[in-house]
Image: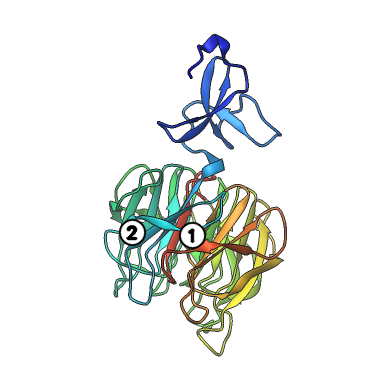
Amino acid sequence: MSLPPSEIPQGAIRFNTDSQRLEFYAQGEWWVMSTDTPNLGSIGGTLAFAPNARDVTLGARGIFGGGESPSIVDTIDYINISSTGDAVNFGDLSQARRNLAGAADKSRGLFQGGYTPSNVDTVDFVTIASLGDATDFGNLTESRSRTGGCNNPTRGIRAGGNPYTDTIDYCTIQSEGNYVDFGNLTVSRFGPAGMSSPTRGVFSGGQTPSSGVQGIDTMDFITIATLGDAQDFGDMTAARREAIASSNAVRGVFGTGFTSPSSPYGASKALDYVQIASGGNAVQFGDATFNRAETYASFGNPVRGIISGGFTPSLNGGIDMFEYATQGDAVDFGDLSQARAGAAGFSNANGGL
């Protein structure tokens, strides 16, 4: 039954079956529920309401794409971050590849670079709310795999990669085209993990020409809106490469990854965290549910972080979750559609962080 506007109470909530969004009634209008749009009111100090908001954070969607299973795949999966359960099919990449990086805003996600089995400069995009295959976006400034990705609400960033490089390049996520130069990391590396707040991007770890397979403990940061070279942020609790990184607007969590100097499958389950705005050395957060590496597919919403897949040393399809605000161990979320390592990940929450 549909009520006339004069009879709808202030604060009423409905699910719009046409837009598939949760809406709130205020000031004579239905408003899409979001956490980071201009405030008109609040419930419990956590939800704000704005017209035409592009994301319902309560149901923010996380995307996993590509990877090695053990052959290189073009599969794209998705989950609803606020619930638990197994990932389901979203579509396919334009070409099968692994060791690629993700970036996203609230409506569009990017799959950057990768290995096919040669390094490529390919960038694909998807519209996160609409299931379907990825479409060509443009090209990186160089062909690279094992690269780090991050973003703010408008820009996508790619940093480092294999072969060793210190290059950082960027795009405007809503404008298809080729990437352009942003600056340089403090040292050439492949396998850094990337995360971001709305203003700052952080790249942690990776392998340098002199580090050996366990990688480095260095963290760099950039101000995403301002072109220029990265600066030192601090150090992780341990050297690692090809690890996870996931963040909300305040706290970044990273860890797992290759850490052993004696074996390429000397993977860790340890997680660290930092306050993104302040810089400084990382602090122990907890552990993933198992040791894993090549876990590029990590992301989150404002409350919950997600880790997926990786080598254990066998291929694994497990998805973990944790809450940023609460130090402790990750717990089981579900499984990918197929066990794999080296996938990319992003979400449409937090402006795509």
Q: Mark 2 points at which residue?
A: 140
Does residue 271 sit above or below 54 in this rendering?
Answer: below
Q: Residue at x 46, y 28 (%)?
A: 52
- Mark yes or no: residue 203 visible: no
Q: What amino acid is labelled 2 in the image? A: Leu
Q: Nearer the viewer, mark 2 or mark 1?
A: 1
The residue under the point 66% across, 54% down is 324
Q: Residue at x 56, y 55 (%)?
A: 84
Q: Which mark is residue 86?
A: 1
The structure residue drawn at horizontal position 61% and vertical position 31%, both measured from the top left corner, is 48
Q: What element carries label 2?
A: loop
Q: Position of residue 62 (x, y in %)?
A: 48, 52
- Name the one closer to the observer, 330 or 115: 330
Mark 2 packing: few (<14 Cα in 10 Å), some, or many (20+)?
A: many
Percent of width and height locating residue 6: 55, 9
For the question of whether residue 79 can be seen, the reply is yes
Q: Quadrant of residue 160?
A: bottom left
